[in-house]
Image: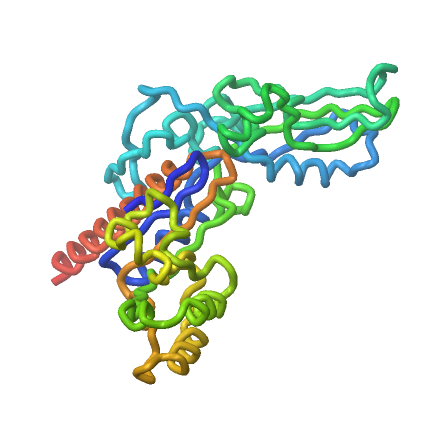
């Protein structure tokens, strides 16, 4: 179930599974989704104050996006054991292959993209400290470009003023000239190929308040309950957004008396404090909150670095997991066949 989906952020639920499956999905999204990153930099000149190695390192961490064109190559990937696994729609492997699987000696148009940059601060009209950015990089493939903004909203706010990501500053008379080769890889090989900057999951909290008893308390006591947890964790129902589905079950006259969870990610950290306080003010002498962490339902928060839309990261991760199961099944069948033949 998708809770929230933006250009490069998503919050979604997976249900009726266990923690091992959720963690497998998290690990694959971080370390086994294929992306492209700069892997080789050849300097012709660098008279800046920054060493070649530092500039190369910055270039490697620069996200690179790929503009998928429908119909490119096949829609299936041959697995290592001979089976077929479907590509995600925007999978960069529709267009490029791993360098290690290519027939070329070093790199070519089928397994890499080359960027070039040549900037010199020799114009009197230029500032004393000229900032060289990713906007100065020239790609030999129009469909593969460095990421300057992570979301469409940020691009719109820039109003065409695309400065890019800073690479190095050049003083008067300084120059930097190099070529950089971007190749396919995965985060397991190096973090620069990881498509996400955040990928976490948490168990879904199951929280229930004794609403009838709470409604009978005075407003100052209800305010005190809400203030036990940090601001934004608990709130009254009248503070919920108008499109929150929970509002439909709460009459408008009761919304100031109904306490709800506003931040599910933090509520479990404060359940004991809330339970202790509500027990002391409850007419029944019992806690007015009951909460537990689900063992089968999990909430994911994922944020892309901008190279791949977050929904494509999820689909590519699912495809990778399917490929692993296909290979495992082939291995088990092969071993079983060998055992039968030997007996």
Q: Residue at x 42, y 46 (%)?
A: 32
Residue 269 visible here: no
Query: Within the image, what quadrant is residue 320 found in?
Result: top left
* Extreme residue in the bottom direction: 285
Eyeballing the image, is 262 above or below 71? below
Q: Residue at x 63, y 21 (%)?
A: 161
Front residue of this view, candidates 280 and 9: 280
**Which image quarter is the C terminus in?**
bottom left
Front residue of this view, candidates 256 and 17: 256
Left or right of 15 on screen, residue 160: right
Q: Position of residue 245 (x, y in %)?
A: 28, 48
Q: Position of residue 184 (x, y in %)?
A: 48, 35
Q: Residue at x 59, y 35 (%)?
A: 62
Q: Position of residue 133 (x, y in %)?
A: 68, 27
Colouring mode (rainbow / by chain / secondary structure / one colour): rainbow
Left or right of 54 on screen, residue 307: left
Eyeballing the image, is 7 above or below 10? above
Front residue of this view, candidates 74 and 297: 297
Query: Within the image, what quadrant is residue 67 found in?
Result: top left
Query: Within the image, what quadrant is residue 42 found in?
Result: top right
Q: Position of residue 140 (x, y in %)?
A: 56, 18
Eyeballing the image, is 296 above or below 213? above
Front residue of this view, candidates 322 and 289: 289
Residue 267 visible here: yes
Q: Residue at x 31, y 19 (%)?
A: 71
Left or right of 177 on screen, residue 89: left
């Amino acid at each position: 179930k998708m809770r929230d989906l933006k250009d490069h952020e998503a919050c979604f639920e997976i249900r009726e599974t266990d923690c091992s499956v959720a963690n497998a999905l998290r690990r694959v999204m971080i370390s086994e989704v294929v992306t492209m990153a700069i892997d080789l930099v050849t300097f012709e000149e660098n008279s800046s104050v920054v060493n070649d190695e530092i500039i190369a390192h910055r270039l490697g961490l620069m996200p690179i996006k790929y503009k998928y064109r429908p119909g490119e190559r096949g829609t299936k990937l041959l697995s290592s054991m001979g089976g077929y696994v479907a590509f995600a729609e925007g999978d960069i492997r529709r267009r490029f292959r791993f360098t290690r699987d290519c027939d070329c000696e070093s790199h070519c148009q089928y397994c890499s993209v080359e960027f070039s940059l040549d900037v010199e601060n020799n114009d009197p009209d230029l500032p004393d400290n000229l900032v060289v950015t990713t906007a100065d990089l020239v790609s030999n493939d129009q469909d593969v470009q460095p990421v300057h903004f992570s979301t469409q909203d940020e691009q719109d706010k820039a109003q065409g003023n695309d400065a890019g990501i800073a690479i190095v500053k050049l003083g008067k008379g300084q120059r930097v000239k190099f070529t950089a080769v971007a190749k396919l890889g995965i985060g397991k090989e190096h973090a620069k190929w990881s498509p996400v900057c955040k990928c976490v999951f948490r168990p879904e909290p199951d929280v229930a308040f004794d609403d009838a008893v709470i409604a009978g308390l005075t407003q100052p006591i209800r305010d005190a309950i809400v203030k036990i947890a940090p601001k934004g964790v608990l709130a009254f129902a009248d503070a919920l957004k108008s499109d929150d589905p929970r509002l439909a079950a709460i009459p408008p006259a009761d919304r100031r008396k109904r306490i709800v969870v506003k931040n599910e990610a933090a509520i479990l950290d404060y359940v004991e404090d809330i339970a202790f306080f509500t027990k002391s003010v409850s007419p029944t002498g019992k806690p007015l909150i009951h909460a537990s962490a689900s063992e089968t339902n999990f909430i994911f928060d994922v944020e892309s670095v901008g190279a791949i839309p977050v929904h494509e990261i999820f689909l590519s991760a699912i495809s990778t997991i399917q490929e692993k199961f296909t290979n495992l099944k082939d291995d088990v069948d092969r071993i079983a066949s060998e055992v039968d033949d030997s007996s």
